[in-house]
Amino acid sequence: MRIKIFSVALLLGFLSSLSAQDIYLPVSSSSEAAKSQYFKAIQAAENANIPDFFDGMKAAVKTDPKFFMAYVNLAFGETAFGQYEKAAAFIKPALAIDPAGFNKNEQIHRKALEAWDKDPKADPAKYMEELTAAYPNTAEAYDLAGRSAKWLSKDPKAAVKHLLRMLELRPDFGGGYNSLGYTYMELGEMGKAKAAFEKYIALAPKEPNAYDSMADYYLTNKEYAKSVEFYDKAAAMGMGNAMAGADRARAGMKGNVAVVDGLYQAFTKGDVPAVLAVMDANIVWNEAEGFPYADQNPYLGPDAVLNGVFGRIGAEWEYFDLTDIQLHDMSDNMVLATLRYKAKHKTTGKVIDSQTAHLWTLWDNKIVAFQQFTDTKQAAEAVK
């Protein structure tokens, strides 16, 4: 993910186990419509949809021009991006709101805005400490303090402290683990970062941003093949900017893994000439023993593979998809691909969904050998 920049509340989808007062800081608005827009904006930010976050907060202040915390969110968000002039445009109307009747949360945030009005780069750390002291059992106070420490105070150690306390209060909040993972990455604690992102995926398996965040971790760790895998998954789930991440990861690939990844990309597009182009003229290709096309093992040379394997697959199967591809760089110029076959036979109508592995051997950026491993029983049953 691009880390979820600056929301001041927790994801709305997990309200069932705790009361609102345990989760959220109190806000004041006379308009229920404005409150609805406010919380939808917060949810958008928690799903890494920053444009909708800003649009929603702007809609909230349009609906209720005296919605103080909506202005606060807009000012904090722009400040986190370093957009101080844009932040000032929200600080001024916020400070013009009569503070009579403000709750403690709003009083503390008003002091922070007053400091920013004098100095756009003022450190809000003391106000965040005051906030957590005032609301010691409210998860949002620590969520906000953690994000503030990371983005505004530039203090990742303090951010970790606040985020860990927030997760004690909200252990089922995936977005909190996302923030924690990026903060650990900033500190260079990559093992802890990976564990945090894994927890995010476990808690929010249908959230594409969880996979995008893990892809960022692998990209930072220069594990390019794994990074591509997770970016592709996020993109397949609808996260558009994950495709750009996948392109960056592929650009970082070098040597054998890049060659094999390119082959699978070409195969997915149906670009058979590109697939054959990376094969050595003397390639030795072996299908798994018992697989329908093992009858002509070994296939020697690209033409033999084209006619004896690819041609027969195209003629005999309605579709033959390779999914869940993961690439593993091995010793001795080998790359191991783990994947699944999902296919439907034209004549029998039977389908297969089989766990599979491909072992590729390369030399001088060309594939010189291939060995297939798969569930041959499924395929044999499908062609009967």
Image: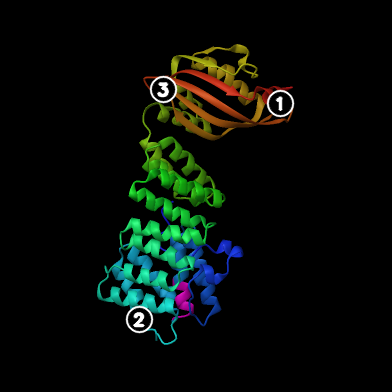
Q: Position of residue 347 (x, y in %)?
A: 73, 26
Magenta span covers which residues? Answer: 58-65
Query: How are the colours assigned in the image?
Result: rainbow
Determine whether 124 is above or below 252 in the image: below
Q: Secondary structure at mark 3?
A: loop
| Residue at the outermost left position | 119
Residue 110 visible in the snapshot: yes
- Mark drawn on residue 331: 3
Q: Amino acid at mark 1?
A: Ala
Residue 63 falls inside the magenta stretch: yes
- N-terminal of the two: label 3 or label 1? 3
User: Which numbered dot is residue 144?
Assistant: none
Residue in the image at 50% along x and 22% along y: 359
**Residue 217 against residue 316 in the figure, above or below:** below
- Nearer to the camera, 208 or 351: 208
Q: Quick one: label 2 or label 3, which is nearer the N terminus?
A: 2
Element under disc 2: helix
Residue 304, quarter of the rendered image? top right
Q: What residue is disc 2 on? A: 95
Identify the element where label 1 is drawn: helix
Q: Residues within 10 Å of mark 1 (few under 14, many from 20)?
A: many
**109 falls in the magenta region:** no
Q: Amino acid at mark 3?
A: Ser
2 lies left or right of 298 = left
Question: What separation in Å lies between label 2 and label 3 (alpha carbons)?
Answer: 63 Å
Mark 2 belongs to which amino acid? Leu
Which picture quadrant has residue 287? top right
Is residue 7 visible in the rendered structure shown here?
no
Numbered label tally:
3
Seen from the viewer's position, the closer of residues 119 and 324 is 119
